[in-house]
């Protein structure tokens, strides 16, 4: 389906009012050789999005999320945030577990860390 830019602009104006910061995933090796990952200290970009805490149990189950803890992020524009990287919104940090591109928006699902 061809989504006109005017529709995407209206979506942005009406719904995308929260700022997230993208923090790349940084892997470190422990003394025993185990690897851990954490968000980079510095942000590599910020984006206006619609961020909602997941409240639907079926949706949470489908994506391996926890109700009232993890999040769903939507944006009319493409988001250059790969799966396994991190997003920060306010004092909350989420690890991106899936990214789905649709005709009219991109959806990211995040687990709170």
Image (cartoon, grey):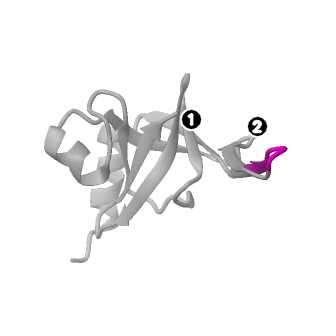
Quadrant of the drawing holding the N terminus:
bottom left
- Residue 90: percent from left, percent from top: 54, 24
Q: Which residue is mark 2?
A: 41
Q: Residue at x 24, y 43 (%)?
A: 60
Residue 111: which numbered mark, if any?
none
Q: Residue at x 56, y 35 (%)?
A: 88
- Along the line of sight, the residue nearer the viewer: 10 or 78: 78
Residue range in magenta is 27-32
- Residue 92: percent from left, percent from top: 52, 27
- Verify whether residue 31 appears in magenta: yes
Q: Which residue is mark 1?
A: 88
**Earlier sequence position, callout 2 versus callout 1:** 2
- Verify whether residue 86 appears in magenta: no
Q: Do residues under tags 2 and 1 come within 8 Å of each other at their CB atoms?
A: no
Local secondary structure at mark 2: loop
- Residue 113: percent from left, percent from top: 52, 33
Q: Residue at x 30, y 49 (%)?
A: 11
Query: Label 2 to label 1, Cα distance in Å?
Result: 11 Å
Query: Mark 1, residues whose alpha carbon is within 10 Å: few (<14), some, or many (≥20)?
Result: some
- Along the line of sight, the residue nearer the viewer: 74 or 59: 59
Horizontal side of 112 relative to 107 (left or right) equals: right
Query: Mark 2, residues whose alpha carbon is within 10 Å: few (<14), some, or many (≥20)?
Result: few
């Amino acid at each position: 389906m061809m989504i006109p830019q005017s529709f995407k602009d209206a979506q942005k104006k009406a719904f995308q009012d929260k700022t997230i910061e993208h923090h790349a995933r940084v892997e470190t090796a422990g003394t025993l050789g185990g690897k851990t990952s954490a968000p980079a200290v510095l942000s590599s970009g910020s984006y206006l999005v619609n961020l909602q805490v997941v409240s639907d149990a079926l949706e949470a189950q489908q994506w391996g999320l926890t109700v009232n803890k993890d999040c769903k992020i939507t944006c009319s524009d493409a988001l250059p945030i790969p799966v396994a990287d991190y997003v920060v919104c306010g004092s909350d940090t989420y690890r991106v577990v899936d990214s789905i591109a649709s005709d009219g928006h991109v959806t990211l699902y995040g687990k709170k860390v």
